[in-house]
Amino acid sequence: MGKIFMISRWLREQGDQPVTRLKFMTQMLGYDIDDGLFELLGR
């Protein structure tokens, strides 16, 4: 799960906010994450 936070931070630093891409990555890893977490990560 820590890698998800690192990837999210890296994408923000690149100026990119593809929540759907990050959500797809987490689903591929077997996580079922609520959209609320991605909203918190986007802050």
Image: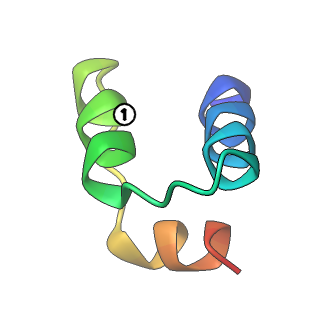
Q: Position of residue 27 (x, y in %)?
A: 24, 33
Q: Position of residue 2 (x, y in %)?
A: 73, 29
36 is higher (above) or lower (below) than 20? below
Residue pushed farthest top? 29
For the C terminus, give its image quadrant.
Answer: bottom right
Nearer the observer, 9 or 39: 9
Which residue is painted at 74% across and 33% down in the image?
6
Viewer-side residue, 30 vs 38:
38
Seen in the picture, residue 36 relative to 8 is either above or below; the reply is: below
The residue beneath circle 1 is 26
Residue 36 found in image quarter: bottom left
Residue 22 screen position, x and y as percent: 39, 43
What's the residue type where badge 1 is placed? Thr
Q: Which picture quadrant has residue 33?
A: bottom left
Number of on-image labels: 1
Q: Residues within 10 Å of mark 1 (few under 14, many from 20)?
A: some
Which residue is pictured at 72% across the width and 38% down the height? Answer: 10
Compared across the picture, whether 37 is left or right of 22 comes to right
